């Protein structure tokens, strides 16, 4: 597919004797959101981490904007990573620096902005995710939901065209979870950000995903729009889609 | 038994490769100067009170023992020189290395371990930052830079402690004590033993960083990384000291005297 921003091609991954991914192939068109749905331990996080080279596949190819990340050296990988924002499951904020410095971190590393410009961008990014006046707070002083928002602000600091989110609603109450979903949806609509969201939360997947891929037993069992999956030939996929909460 | 030995050999090989990578990457940009300076402050400056207090106490105790030995031979005048030579050549560098491996080794092991299990290291990589250079190389460089300085602090606070212990008994003036302390100390007694602590710094930084950076197993893994950092770094400092002392004797024949 010419306009596939992310493309998995026959990817295999094992940890010791445990096969995590077996012959996984899919693609994500530009500006769309793919939700990868599956039970815990089915390789969802491994899949998303492979997209930025945090984990290497045993075989197969992973293309980001047409370039194979499995064959990249450190410098090439670094260039690709600057075009991808990554929201971690537990936010992964740097706990030794303030909230504002967390968001400023990629700006200090990869731009030549002056100090007051960095402050300005950080305040805007924090405001974008609904947070104000917390620049100097430490990550341990804010709630889990706020940490997730700060993680999102940090992931968006360099205005990446691609966003990967690993369980964005994990550990959050339903209302906060919905607020995070709405932030992601807003990004998709206003910035046309290409997204891959890993989740086991079916309402979230329905809200965010243009397409949903169901990962089961190391394989993509089925893939399509939420309406398509409700009519899936696989009983387990149809069963997933009827669930009101998480898998 | 065979699998245990094979596992130990494998780990030693991994640590050696890790150390080689540190050396290789320390000569490659980006230089991470700001982070090295921050680590020098964190690791060095914050260790100063511990090293100074320990040096003072060690000097005082060594002075009391030296007096007890030398006064049998009527050689009390040699107390400052005996103390200074013992302190500069061996006690200062080794005690500093061991205290440093306890304080800093545990700290680096725990900090990097916690960053690994909370995905902060993955987060650094996702932000296009070389986590190995940013976290490991900078800490090891800081360890190498600060240990000779801390050893110097240990040596001089040791001399001060020795003087206090001596003057309480004999009323010796500081000027006389100082002059006698340095009267038998040569370049080879001071500089090579102090500089050998750069190797201690490399060992401590490398072991602690290796264990922290490769932590698995959640919170329990962090605790293990911290404890093992202290144990392995301390034992390696003691063992490497044997080789380093022999190397100093070989390179500086005058140091044996």
Image: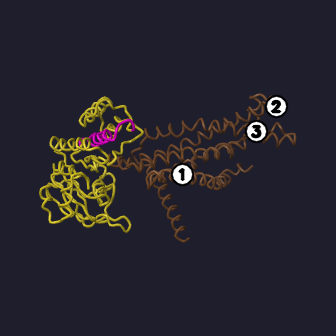
Chain colours: A yellow, B brown
The kind of secondary structure element at disc 3 is: helix
First-in-chain label (1 vs 3): 3
Picture layout, residue B183 above or below residue B223:
above
Distance of mark 1 from mark 2, alpha carbons? 44 Å
In this orientation, which residue lies closer to the viewer: B102 or A222?
Answer: A222
Above-or-below relation of A98 to A37:
above
Q: Which residue is mark 2?
A: B170
| Rendering coords of residue A112 (x, y %) | 30, 36
Task: Measure the alpha-carbon separation of dots 1 and 3.
Answer: 32 Å
x then y, percent, for residue A159? 23, 41
Percent position of residue A202, x then y: 21, 53
Question: Disc 1 vs disc 2: which is toward the camera?
Answer: 1
The answer to whether residue A210 shows anywhere in this view is yes
Dot 3 corresponds to which residue? B63
Mark 1, secondary structure of its residue: helix
Q: Residue at x 32, y 67 (%)?
A: A19
Closest to the observer, B147 or A179: A179
Name the residue tied to disc 1. B229
Point out residue A161 in the picture as x, y percentages from the top left corner.
Answer: 21, 46
Q: CA distance from mark 3 to mark 2?
A: 12 Å
């Amino acid at each position: 597919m010419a306009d596939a921003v992310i493309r998995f091609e026959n990817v295999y991954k094992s940890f010791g004797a445990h096969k995590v991914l077996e012959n996984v192939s899919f693609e994500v068109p530009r500006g769309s959101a793919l939700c990868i749905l599956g039970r815990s331990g089915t390789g969802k996080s491994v899949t998303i981490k492979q997209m930025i080279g945090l984990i290497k596949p045993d075989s197969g190819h992973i293309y980001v904007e047409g370039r194979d990340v499995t064959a990249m050296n450190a410098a090439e990988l670094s260039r690709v990573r600057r075009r991808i924002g990554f929201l971690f499951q537990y936010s992964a904020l740097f706990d030794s620096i303030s909230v504002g410095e967390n968001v400023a971190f990629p700006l200090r590393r990869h731009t030549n902005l002056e100090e007051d410009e960095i402050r300005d961008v950080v305040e805007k990014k924090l405001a974008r995710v609904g947070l104000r006046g917390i620049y100097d707070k430490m990550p341990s002083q804010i709630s889990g939901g706020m940490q997730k928002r700060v993680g999102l602000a940090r992931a968006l600091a360099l205005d990446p065209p691609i966003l990967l989110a690993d369980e964005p609603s994990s550990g959050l109450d339903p209302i906060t979870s919905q607020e995070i979903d709405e932030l992601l949806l807003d990004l998709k609509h206003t910035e046309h950000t290409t997204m891959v969201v890993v989740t086991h939360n079916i309402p979230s997947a329905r809200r965010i995903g243009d397409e949903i891929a169901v990962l089961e037993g190391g394989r993509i069992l089925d893939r399509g729009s939420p309406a398509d999956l409700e009519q899936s030939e696989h009983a387990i996929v149809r069963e997933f889609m009827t669930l009101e909460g998480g898998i | 038994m065979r699998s245990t030995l094979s596992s130990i050999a494998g780990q030693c090989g991994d640590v050696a490769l890790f150390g080689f990578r540190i050396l290789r990457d320390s000569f490659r940009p980006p230089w991470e100067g700001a982070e090295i300076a921050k680590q020098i402050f964190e690791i060095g400056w914050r260790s100063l009170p511990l090293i100074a207090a320990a040096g003072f106490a060690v000097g005082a105790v060594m002075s009391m023992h030296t007096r007890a030995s030398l006064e049998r031979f009527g050689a009390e005048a040699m107390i400052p020189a005996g103390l200074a030579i013992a302190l500069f050549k061996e006690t200062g560098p080794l005690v500093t290395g061991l205290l440093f491996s306890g304080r800093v080794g545990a700290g680096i092991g725990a900090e990097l371990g916690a960053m690994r299990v909370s995905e902060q290291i993955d987060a650094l990589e996702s932000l296009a930052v070389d986590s190995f250079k940013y976290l490991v190389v900078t800490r090891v460089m800081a360890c190498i830079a600060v240990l000779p300085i801390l050893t110097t602090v240990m040596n001089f606070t040791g001399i001060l402690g020795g003087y206090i212990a001596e003057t309480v008994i004999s009323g010796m003036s500081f000027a006389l004590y100082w002059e006698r302390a340095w009267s038998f100390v040569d370049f080879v007694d001071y500089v090579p033993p102090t500089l050998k602590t750069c190797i201690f710094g490399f060992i401590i930084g490398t072991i602690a960083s290796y264990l922290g950076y490769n932590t698995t197993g959640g919170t329990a893994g962090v605790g293990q990384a911290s404890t093992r950092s202290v144990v392995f770094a301390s034992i390696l400092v003691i063992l490497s000291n044997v080789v380093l002392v022999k190397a100093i004797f070989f390179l500086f024949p005058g140091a044996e005297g």
